[in-house]
Image (spheres, helix red, strand yellow):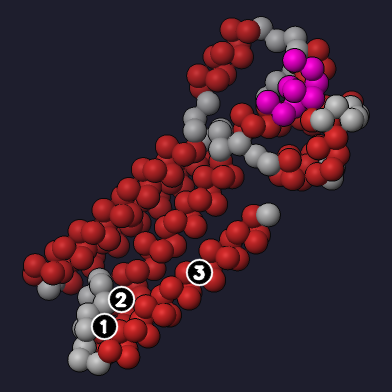
Amino acid sequence: MNIADRIQSLRKMRGISQEELADRIGVSRQAVSKWESEQSIPEIDKIIIMSDFFEVTTDYILKGIEIKEQVKEKEKQDVDANIFLLAGTFLIFIGLVLACAIWYEKQTIAALALGFVLMAMGCLNFGIGIVNSTKNVEKAKKLFWQINIWLLTFVPFSSTYNALFGGFPAPYPLFWGSVFPFQAFWMVYIAFNLSVVFVMVRKGR
């Protein structure tokens, strides 16, 4: 394994793109691409910055010199952000399902409260977990919000729609005798979330 391979390996272990690594160390994405394709070698000051960022020695980047046991121990200690992505999304989804199920059975405001509490717990779980994660952090952040924007906005949109057309909130859209408001709800909900996801994807490039 040469310098190019080690830089690429460290970057992928951290779960970041070439552009994100370039931003961290103050170079262009093309520079990182050239390092990883063996077209050029990073200057010593950039190697020092990378060693601090990746938490390895400069000797490891330059020569691959590092105690194998230390590398294995570090890999064991790495926490994958995808774990918290799944756990947070699961809590949010359960909150939505329970809110809808309880409302269907009892039509009580407690259904909304329970839904909001579980959704908040899902976001909190992800937020705390992502701070302590060392792998796939940026990817997990993007994917979490691209998925959960749909779940998190469903109850607020539904509650507002039902309050406007039926006089009381409910966690899912009810049919109020006219097809137009019901269709309008879905059009606004889908358009809003697609717009948010589109902006997230554009910013993530």
Q: Is residue 118 left or right of residue 195?
A: left
Secondary structure beneath dot 3 equals helix
What is the number of callouts on the image?
3
Q: Amino acid at mark 2?
A: Ser
Which residue has dot 2 on it?
A: 158
| Residue at 21%, 88% in the rendered image | 176
Residue 58 higher or lower than 88, as above or below: above
Q: CA distance from mark 2 to mark 3?
A: 17 Å
Residue 194: assigned label = 3
Which residue has dot 1 on it?
A: 162
x and y percentages locating residue 118 in the rendered image: 28, 55
* Magenta-span inclusion, residue 3: yes
Q: CA distance from mark 1 to mark 2?
A: 6 Å
Span colored in magenta? 1-9
Q: Does residue 33 appear in the picture of this structure?
A: yes
| Residue at 53%, 26% in the rendered image | 78
Predominant secondary structure, magenta span: helix
Secondary structure beneath dot 1 equals helix
The mark that comes first in sequence, 2 or 3, is: 2
> Is 117 in front, or is 189?
189
| Residue at 80%, 21% in the rendered image | 3
| Residue at 79%, 25% in the rendered image | 4
Assess whether mark 2 and mark 1 are in contact (beta carbons under 8 angstroms).
yes
Q: Residue furthest left?
A: 106
Q: Is residue 114 left or right of residue 181?
A: left
**Looking at the figure, which quarter contains the N terminus?**
top right
Crowdedness near tag 2: few (<14), some (14–19) or many (≥20) residues, C-alpha within 10 Å: many
Q: CA distance from mark 3 to mark 1?
A: 22 Å
Crowdedness near tag 1: few (<14), some (14–19) or many (≥20) residues, C-alpha within 10 Å: many
Residue 102: assigned label = none
Q: Does residue 42 appear in the picture of this structure?
A: no
Q: Amino acid at mark 3?
A: Leu
